[in-house]
Image (spheres, grey):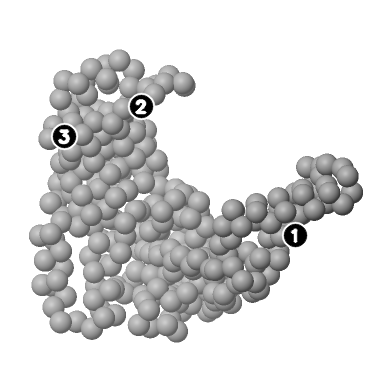
């Protein structure tokens, strides 16, 4: 389920079907790291109950999953062995170990420890909506989101996507929401958190929390050269989100009421239907949020 959403616009229609995408991704099926590999990624099943399906399609939406695995070696283990090796060389040859030699020693020690290192595996879910030319990525960072796009390009030869954009600066529009100069998008309410940053290059930032973030304190900050970089919002009493100045939807939380609605709608469906059904309901809400933002932000020039 989506916890944080990076949104991409597909700049031209994808000229392939979900079955063709499945075939392409299977050429890059995930395989665990080899003994001497530090990290590796590849495509894995988005629905664990259907392990042989890499592209799960439901109502024209394609769900995919990029798996990333990395060997984890504690820095302390490397440094401890490095210190021992440096001390050994200095005692034997009566000379200090130079920086370049030390770097090579560190690399050799890392290679030696790799076969027995523990592995950390992470999945990054994404959905492609060809009809709307949109891709949404459930990633914890921009680098993880971009990894989806770049790995798709590797599999397909091309993946024409760019981060979701609006006509007006998100920071400018969010500041206008907070000081009341422009109405919030339909179905949206201010929640209880805002982060403001000084417009000066070396300026600081401040976090406002409470029942009314749009109070006189916020207005004072906005009138004295600060702009909103993050703003907590409530969408239709269904989702609590934090929108940032890069149009990343962070800290997505489903309300208890909407959680009950989802449960009632899906009923006693099997595990696969439960996953895909709940995913579709959240994805549709996120698409509606993006559409609402695009319309609201473009209205600023009128």
Instruction: State how far apart marks 1 and 2 are (Cα).
Output: 43 Å
Point out which mark residue 189 bears: none
Query: In this rendering, does residue 56 appear at all?
Result: yes
Disc 2 marks which residue?
205
Disc 3 marks which residue?
210
In the structure shown, which secondary structural element does the residue marked by tag 1 occupy? helix
- Furthest toward the top, the residue is 224
Instruction: State how far apart marks 1 and 3 are (Cα).
Output: 53 Å
| CB within 8 Å, label 1 to label 3 | no
* Residue 175 point in image, percent of width and height: 27, 28
Of tags 1 and 3, which is closer to the observer? 1
In the structure shown, which secondary structural element does the residue marked by tag 3 occupy? loop
Query: Which of the two labelled residues, at mark 1 and mark 3, occupies the earlier sequence position?
Result: 1
Q: Classify 10 Å Cα crowding around label 1: few (below 14), some (14-19), many (20 and above).
A: few
Give above or below for 107 relative to 123.
above
Query: In this rendering, does residue 11 appear at all?
Result: no
* Residue 69 point in image, percent of width and height: 53, 67
| Rendering quarter of residue 99 | top right
Query: Which of the two labelled residues, at mark 3 and mark 2, occupies the earlier sequence position?
Result: 2
Residue in view at x 17 percent, y 40 percent: 191
In the structure shown, which secondary structural element does the residue marked by tag 2 occupy? strand
| CB within 8 Å, label 3 to label 2 | no
């Amino acid at each position: 389920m989506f916890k944080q959403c990076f949104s991409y616009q597909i700049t031209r229609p994808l000229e392939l079907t979900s079955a063709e995408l499945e075939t392409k991704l299977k050429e890059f099926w995930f395989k665990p790291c080899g003994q001497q590999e530090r990290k590796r990624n590849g495509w894995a099943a988005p629905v664990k109950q259907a392990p042989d399906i890499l592209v799960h399609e439901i109502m024209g939406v394609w769900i995919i999953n990029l798996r990333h695995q990395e060997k984890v070696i504690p820095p302390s283990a490397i440094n401890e062995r490095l210190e021992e090796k440096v001390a050994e060389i200095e005692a034997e040859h009566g000379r200090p170990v130079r920086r370049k030699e030390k770097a090579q020693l560190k690399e050799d020690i890392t290679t030696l420890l790799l076969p027995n290192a523990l592995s950390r595996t992470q999945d990054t879910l994404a959905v492609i909506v060809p009809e709307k030319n949109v891709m949404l990525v459930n990633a914890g960072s921009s680098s993880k989101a971009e990894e989806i796009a770049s790995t798709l390009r590797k599999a397909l030869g091309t993946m024409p996507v760019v981060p979701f954009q609006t006509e007006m600066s998100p920071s400018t529009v969010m500041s206008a929401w907070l000081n009341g100069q422009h109405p919030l998008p339909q179905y949206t309410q201010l929640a209880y958190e805002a982060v403001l940053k000084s417009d000066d290059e070396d300026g600081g930032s401040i976090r406002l929390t409470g029942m009314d973030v749009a109070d006189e304190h916020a207005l004072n900050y906005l009138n004295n050269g600060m702009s909103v970089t993050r703003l907590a919002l409530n969408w239709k009493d269904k989702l609590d989100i934090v929108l940032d100045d890069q149009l990343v939807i962070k800290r997505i939380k489903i309300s208890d009421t909407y959680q009950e609605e989802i449960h009632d709608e899906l009923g006693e469906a099997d595990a696969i239907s439960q996953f895909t059904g709940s995913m579709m309901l959240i994805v549709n809400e996120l698409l509606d949020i993006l559409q609402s933002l695009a319309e609201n932000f473009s209205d600023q020039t009128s």
